[in-house]
Image: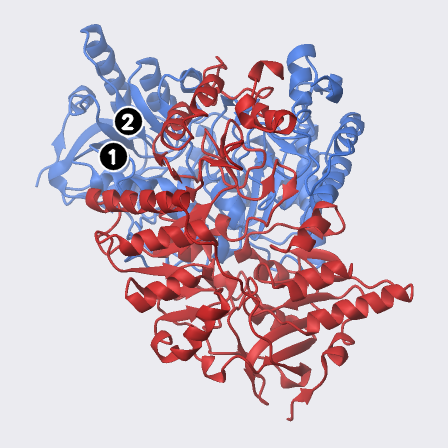
Chain colours: A blue, B red
Amino acid sequence: MALKFISAEEAASLVKHNDNVGFSGFTHAGCPKVVPVAIAKLAEEEHAKGNSFKIGVFTGASTGDSIDGSLTRAKAIKFRTPYQTNKDMRVALNNGEFDFFDLHLSQLAQEIRYGFLGKINVAVVEACDVTESGEIVPTTGVGITPTICRLADIVIVELNKSVPTKLRGIHDMYELQDPPKRREIPIYEVQNRVGLEYVKVDPAKIYVVETNKDGEGGGFAPVDDVTARIGNNVAEFFVSELKAGRIPAHFLPIQSGVGNIANAVLASMGSNPAIPRFEVYTEVIQDAVIDMMQQGNISFASGCSLTVSNEVLHKFYEDLSFFKNKLVLRPSEISNNPGLARRLGIIALNTAIEVDIFGNVNSTHVNGTKMMNGIGGSGDFTRNSYLSIFLTPSTAKNGTISCIVPKVTHEDHNEHSVKIIVSEYGVADLRGKGPRNRAEEIIEKCAHPDYRPLLHDYLNRGVKGHIPQDLYACFAFHKALEETGSMINADFSKL
Amino acid sequence: MALKFISAEEAASLVKHNDNVGFSGFTHAGCPKVVPVAIAKLAEEEHAKGNSFKIGVFTGASTGDSIDGSLTRAKAIKFRTPYQTNKDMRVALNNGEFDFFDLHLSQLAQEIRYGFLGKINVAVVEACDVTESGEIVPTTGVGITPTICRLADIVIVELNKSVPTKLRGIHDMYELQDPPKRREIPIYEVQNRVGLEYVKVDPAKIYVVETNKDGEGGGFAPVDDVTARIGNNVAEFFVSELKAGRIPAHFLPIQSGVGNIANAVLASMGSNPAIPRFEVYTEVIQDAVIDMMQQGNISFASGCSLTVSNEVLHKFYEDLSFFKNKLVLRPSEISNNPGLARRLGIIALNTAIEVDIFGNVNSTHVNGTKMMNGIGGSGDFTRNSYLSIFLTPSTAKNGTISCIVPKVTHEDHNEHSVKIIVSEYGVADLRGKGPRNRAEEIIEKCAHPDYRPLLHDYLNRGVKGHIPQDLYACFAFHKALEETGSMINADFSKL
């Protein structure tokens, strides 16, 4: 059966008002780039005619600007899940323009299948290859691709000619059966492959749009002194855990979040001779991982996306034969699977917006109200890890914000699951400590020295109970920031 | 090799100051009853002589009074994890007398093995049988028994003659390997058995203390009108989900928490003809489950303990041949395993102390400070369930407390994981709703009508952002309760 080649505009016209549309990819990697822009344009045209046009947007994680930016600016979104990092979308969802459900990334594919979020009408997926038999080979990010391709009535394939077809073989496409017929995922080592090199769908529902777009990835800021110190603290902590026998001698797979701190930690691990060569089982494979694979510090990487700068991406394509048996890209329900995180014994490294003295972490909402990005996979990994670690600088904005606070304003990870906190000042080990001792540990090891007296004052206000928090003084730091421009002016008696 | 029979006092003398002691059981079920009392007596004697004597106490969950009550009253505890329900222990830990780590129950066995919590020196386990070859057959609760028996230098077996030896065969004892060598747990259906009928240890380290103690289980309060209405709301919700195809026609395994509300839900499910016969995959098997198995409403039950009244326990022993192929008791790392909860697709039903309008749940701390019991298995199940449900009456203490509040004072389960909330007024379905719509849904469906205007006032204070919470008014309900005796007098402008 011959494939149906159409234009981006023709593809957009297949999407109707009120449809739920699933997009491939995870971060900007693997996202379609021209069809969503065409859908946004169609929405604007419909709005100009006085017609309603809004869609539900389902993706693996965040996207490139072509999806979240274009569709937000066109006011074409009625619902969004599970995660975003786009500046226009952030403003819109904080203004309440549409419903956003901030979901654990591992759960989206199954919640779609369970019927909890409505029918997926159209899938739009980027591919480096598509065959007449219906084999779709994704590009550099997977996300929820297998599920949306299977469930959608229409599958629009953006065939991106800038991505080499020889990428085929880097993916491991495996979709879970649903309960009560679900089996184990037969991954026992990071490098195990359990699925196909492609997604297979009925070719009758495929429409192909040819493109030739480069990736939408930017670079990272260089590692500064604070992030370097956080990285070194993590590496030294690992060395001491190895010596104590609490981490096995051959190490365990690392999950590391996105951004500069994660890159700094990986760099510190790579340059520490006491840390053996290790594996990565994570959601996002960043620049540092690719570099460290080439240098021999990382032996294998499993992820959901290759979220790298264009420079590194082109290097990766050039050296594909080197990477092909050292790297695998999986759907998010596999890369982030709680059962696998626990089975493989991953060490989870994630960053925090703020941490409180009792060991709770805010990963999502600035001041408890303004959504930053979302919880992403941090919940999938933290709760089910061998050891959960959160990373934060002790302060932000030139010291006016303490990232260690009396109480987090929004709670994404709680005292039950958070084991280690690391700042540039040190490592707080919360294992086996009750709330008061956790607080002492966090204040002394992680808080900025300028904020330690204030935090001790709060802890020692004489509140009775297992957790001596004062409900009426707990946000004094945030109030001082709002009223005086710095948390250092916190006055607990004023509330 | 002949077993070494000793007295409880001789057994206690094997325990030294600063030892970590692991006890069998889960709730009062399966806990040793005479050796811990003898350890408490020894501690008091040592204290009277001016000597230090404190131990770390590790169990499956809560215990009978013989462990947590006796040891607390003797001031013999230096550390306790993962859960408790004892009134004396509650007072002591809220007074900060010892460190308590409130841990997800599924995680304790592995955290002990990983070395995160120190060495287990002595295991004290209740058994209905023990052989010269070192086979120990537990009684009605398992908990962390396999792990503590293997790791401890000394294993003290309380051989309880009041428990029939023919209980052998009801247990499925399976201990996980640790990463990086961990394999899947080969349980695909609730009734699968994967381990041994006993725990096997080197007989050289076994000491046996013979006892003849009945269980320490009390009964439940009869189902009142409010709990009955909650139960009916859950059952009707299940019927509508079945009709919509969002729960498979043959239903899914139920996990249900401990207490009267859980019993009421099970009773409502059993009496609703539109709900098919179902299975239970849970931590605690309560009275209602046993009754419903005899009535044919529940086909199989897998749990960590048989936490029933003595009356039901004796009925169970009399009819053991009926139950033997319909009920299995497993270690807590299997009964509560996140990977299994997700694979089996369990429906998680747990109770809340308070719920907030954005979908966060407090399961542990009254007023955010006073520990009630602990998170128990609610985190293991909620996060990894097919569908997570929290149950709460709309009010407590004659309406002076609203169980639906602007902000929970302690957060054990968050918006990312909580899908359904049920009170006697109705069912709030949070799936696919952003924070504002979740709040409307919870207020309208679950809050007591007297509190709805106040909650709407809070929601509509004009706070900007994705989550419109007011950090300086969010605890006005709790302040009003403290100052006026009722949350109904909350005044948001006063804070």
Q: Where B388 sits versus A222, above or below?
A: below
Residue at the disc numbered 2? A56
Q: Which mark is residue A118?
A: 1
Q: Is residue B240 left or right of residue B376?
A: left
Q: Is residue A430 left or right of residue A382?
A: right
Name the residue located 86 percent from the left edge and 63 percent from the top edge.
B47
Q: Is residue A445 left or right of residue B110?
A: right
Q: Residue A290, position in %: x, y?
A: 50, 41
Q: Amino acid at mark 1?
A: Gly
Q: Amino acid at mark 2?
A: Gly
Task: Determine the image quadrant of residue A398.
Answer: top right
CB-based contact (under 8 Å), mark 1 and mark 2: yes
The answer to which of marks 1 and 2 sits earlier in the sequence is: 2
Say which element carries label 2. strand
Badge 2: few (under 14), some or many (20 or more) residues near its Cα, within 10 Å? many
Q: Alpha-carbon distance for marks 1 and 2? A: 9 Å
